[in-house]
Image (cartoon, helix red, strand yellow):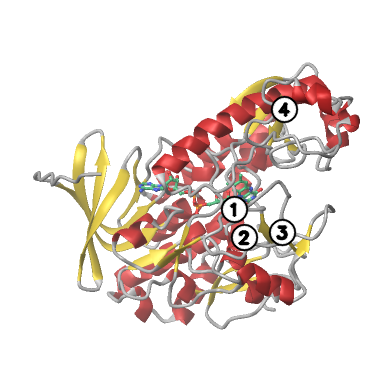
Amino acid sequence: MSARIYACEVPVRSRHDVVVVGGGTAGVAAAVAAARGGARTMLIEAQGLLGGTMTAGLVTPIGAATTRGGRRFGGILWELLDRVEALAREHLGAAGEPHSAPHHMAEALRALAAGAGVEVLLRTALVDAERAGDRVERLLVHNKGGLAWVEGGCFIDASGDADLLRAVGEATVLGSEPGVFDQLVRGGYAEVHEGGGAYQGYASSGCLQPVTLFFTMGGVEVERAMALNNRRLTYADVGLTRADFLRLPYANTPGFEVGAGDELPLPQGRVLVTRTPRPGVVAVNMSRITGVDGSDPDQLSRAEMAARAQVMALVDLLRRCIPGFAQAWLAEIAPSLGVRETHRLVGRTVLSGSAVIACAAHPEAVAQGSYMIDIHDPQGRRKAIGGELRGECYDIPYGCLLPRTVSNLLAAGRCISVDHVAHSSTRIQGTCLLTGQAAGTAAALCCVRGCAPADLPVAALQQRLRADGVTLHPH
Ligand SMILES: Cc1cc2nc3c(=O)[nH]c(=O)nc-3n(C[C@H](O)[C@H](O)[C@H](O)COP(=O)(O)OP(=O)(O)OC[C@H]3O[C@@H](n4cnc5c(N)ncnc54)[C@H](O)[C@@H]3O)c2cc1C
């Protein structure tokens, strides 16, 4: 590919105390916390709504909102849950499953950001960043107005893909580190969720969890639909033969490769639906494309196209032979592909999978997680590799949010500094909201004190987080 230099004058759009890149769960929590802390805060989001994977990806279940024993983590996470619950009651008359209403999520996030006085700039993408010495000076962004500079005192990367961290040359890692999976196995921890022989693991580095396009279906007889849910199925279970399946137009297309055995070929190996508060509507988590780097635009586009074809095939298959779906219809396909894993910061502290599994305490905890190790098979159709934690919850130290070389930048959410195994737990939305709140609170405190994030006393940050309703549970 040949390259050409393009030069133009770029206006400075605005200057803020704190600029957050990415308006997913982590970015909204970060921006709200920063603004509440007194910082003039801008939130830059590439899409036309807030929530990222939670809303545009239709991934609404908020995991890790409590310790494994059910004690709440509090903070903006629980403000969001309470707001969504209230909206569900008002609009649907339903108390349960508030999480399964993405539009309520988007509205609750909008209201949180607006209430805190965050300046939200939608449909605007980070293009590049200018670094001077150890500081980020300004962000180059693009939207319908063209290119513009956005200046700031402190920046937070909540892009999920570590876009800002990579733009300023911080060290990041893509996917699995070599040997991480083997370490789990040697430690006697890794477990395969179901039969079919031992999982071989992945020897090479850079393995990524698969991507999934969520969709919802209406007109479902939900109780009947649950009968075959979350199980590996044979052709006979659904009243088909292998020959019947081979006659389907999507047989042997990606995700539906017909094997020699009697197992019904499905992209994730199973029917996987969850209830929603809307009568007769279920959310379907059944598409899967492996080997995709969700931060590479070409790979992402190919995967989005392939996943859409998979969704149409899945709708047909569900209607054709899964009990409860005979009269069902496709209600909604997520506008955006769900990306589980791309680049992570290699920061001052790297939280390890073994610390997560052991539920290790850390004196510099600024957030906590409680979700199981949940590595969706990067190579095939198995559900997940992982298992439960060995305690109530684990600590995420402040150093996981801090880059090594840039002084006025923090990470939040999916791209914080953890290893591949730890990431399979810290990527969960409750934890992303908590690391977002910690990053935003730290950024605001730094503005007030005139110090760099790395120089902020962690005790002061912990004290402020507690005052703002975050519970850092004792171990
Ligand atoms: C299929 C799937 C199922 C899952 N299931 C669950 C579950 O059941 N429970 C659970 O709790 N979690 C689940 N997760 C994990 C969870 O949804 C995500 O890890 C989490 O939402 C990530 O939040 P985030 O804010 O860090 O990143 P994201 O949600 O990815 O948000 C990043 C935001 O940044 C924006 N952005 C990115 N780059 C730029 C840029 N250059 N300029 C401007 N904006 C940018 C994006 O548009 C996006 O809005 C699932 C994930 C997937 C993919």
User: What amino acid does circle 1 point to?
Assistant: Gln
Instruction: State which tag comes first along the sequence, 4 or 1.
Output: 1
Asked whether, in this view, residue 462 is left or right of residue 9, the answer is: right
Report helix, strand or loop for mark 4: loop
The answer to whether the residues at label 2 and label 1 have Cβ atoms under 8 Å apart is yes
Report helix, strand or loop for mark 2: helix
The label nearer to you, 3 versus 4, is 3
The answer, for residue 22, to whether it is visible in the render is yes
User: What amino acid does circle 3 point to?
Assistant: Ile
The label nearer to you, 2 versus 1, is 1
Q: Residues within 10 Å of mark 2 (few under 14, many from 20)?
A: many
The label nearer to you, 2 versus 3, is 3
Where in the figure is residue 113, as x and y percent of width and height? 43, 47
Residue bearing the label numbered 1: 209
Q: Is mark 4 within 8 Å of ligand 1?
A: no
Q: Which mark is residue 385?
A: 3
Residue bearing the label numbered 2: 424
Q: Residues within 10 Å of mark 4 (few under 14, many from 20)?
A: many
User: In the picture shown, does residue 432 fall above or below 50?
Assistant: below
Asked whether, in this view, residue 361 is left or right of residue 171, the answer is: right
Asked whether, in this view, residue 272 is left or right of residue 304, the answer is: right
Q: Residue furthest top?
A: 327
Q: CA distance from mark 4 to mark 2?
A: 28 Å
The residue lying at 44 percent from left, 54 percent from top is 161
Residue bearing the label numbered 4: 281
User: In the picture shown, does residue 194 fall above or below 222?
Assistant: below
Q: Residues within 10 Å of mark 3 (few under 14, many from 20)?
A: many
Q: CA distance from mark 1 to mark 3?
A: 11 Å
Q: CA distance from mark 2 to mark 3?
A: 10 Å
Q: Quadrant of residue 445?
A: bottom left
User: What amino acid does circle 4 point to?
Assistant: Val
The label nearer to you, 4 versus 1, is 1
